[in-house]
Amino acid sequence: MDYDVIIVGAGSMGMAAGYYLSLAGKKVLLLDSNNPPHDKGSHHGETRIIRHAYGEGEEYVPLALQSQKLWYELEKETGKQLFLKTGVLNVGKESSNFMQNIISSSKRFSLPIEVMNAEAIKERWPGMEIPTDFIGCYESTSGVLRCEDCLKAYRELAITNGATLRTNSRVTSLSVTEERATVSTESHSFTAKSLIIAVGAWSNQLLSMIDLELPLTPVRKTFAWFGVDEELYGEENFPAFSFETSNGQYYGFPSIQRAGLKLGRHDGGNTINPDQEMAPFEEVREDQADLTQFLSNYMPFTKELLYGKTCTYTLTPDEDFIVDLHPKYPNVAIAAGFSGHGFKFSSAIGKILSELVIDRKTKADIGLFAMKRFN
């Protein structure tokens, strides 16, 4: 069967691209080896933080603001609440690059950041214990995305607009010319004028079929929920947060709908083969120990572990994304290496991918994400 665009990988970026292409009237096929949303990639776990003043670099701010605009549009289109304006508190030493990037990007883009010392943080959020040499940057306009609900919304709208989604359909072969792409699964073969590849940890397995290899490292990550006093840590009173500490980088969420405080570690993680089952959270003692140590130091009034989960980051060497056209085949767009901070941008990245395969270019500035930086 022939399509305008085939999207391999219907996760965060792929499903959003499918929606925007269907909105543009394109005949779209989405293929996924699972049934999204699912727990085999990087989009599960109920929630993701969206920040605008960006510690990873000022270059991300326009993309973050565009993404926020598109999330609001998706809420309006679906009539569902997908974004919770909890605010986000970033904490660390004032001298750190991460905190300085937040402060400088807030000034450059006139973002509402409140810079606070340790005493002011503890006074506003009594559930926190903050070292005296740390500061906080609180952004009241940012917050939390319901990640699985966002994916479901894009899925439903894309299908309503005429897109075809084939789940549990693992791609076995790809072949591409400048005019055509042929994609085969175990049971079917499909052709299209253009192709989008957005398969996370499986990227190099597919890209090797079309003469490309990228410096991507899939790693195992964990996060967990802990019992709390809702007066201290509930969503009405407590922000989403990120902490840069001497032991590592941590992020988390208030107790949303009384589910418990959610906490994960951003850095670290062991390299994995995405086709092999990861050790579950409860089988690796260090997973819980690392998170409980953080809580005892910085949020000491939290309670028992409720449960934990695993997920995957796919890292680039510089932890910036890859969003680009194939160097030999301009009808193939690639999205990969989102390095654990990509979901918030998936609305804008999906739109960018749709523009790349329709026009072979995008109005967005994606120079930071060009794959030629690895040559």
Image (spheres, helix red, strand yellow):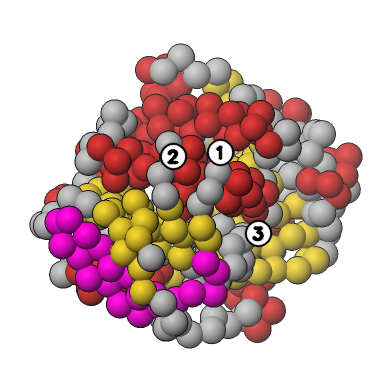
Name which quarter of the figure residue 225 lies in.
Answer: bottom right
Please tell me how crowded label 3 is: few (under 14), some (14-19), or many (20+) other residues with Cα within 10 Å.
some
Which residue corresponds to the image point at 14% horizontal and 56% vertical from the top-left?
178
Q: Amino acid at mark 2?
A: Gly
Residue furthest front in the image = 1
Q: Does 364 appear above or below 279?
A: above
Q: Does 95 appear above or below 222?
A: above
Q: How many marks?
A: 3
Name which quarter of the figure residue 302 lies in.
Answer: bottom right
Please tell me how crowded label 2 is: few (under 14), some (14-19), or many (20+) other residues with Cα within 10 Å.
few
Q: Amino acid at mark 3?
A: Gly
Mark 1 or mark 2: name the one nearer the start of the chain. Answer: 2
Which residue is the site of mark 3? 45
* For the residues bearing labels 1 and 2, Cβ distance under 8 angstroms: no
Q: Secondary structure at mark 1?
A: strand
> Where residue 235 appears, x then y in whole percent?
79, 39
Q: Which residues are magenta?
A: 166-185
Report the Cα–Cα distance between label 1 and label 2.
29 Å
The reply to whether the magenta stretch includes residue 169 is yes
Report the Cα–Cα distance between label 1 and label 3.
15 Å
Q: Amino acid at mark 1?
A: Ile
Checking the image for residue 25, the label placed there is 2
Rendered-image quadrant of the C terminus: bottom left
> Where residue 333 appears, x then y in whole percent?
28, 52
Q: Is 236 in front, or is 81? A: 81
Which residue corresponds to the image point at 35% horizontal and 44% vertical from the top-left?
353
Q: Is residue 193 visible?
A: yes
Asked whether, in this view, residue 267 is left or right of residue 315, the answer is right
Which residue corresponds to the image point at 78% horizontal and 46% vertical from the top-left?
256
Asked whether, in this view, residue 187 is left or right of residue 262, the answer is left
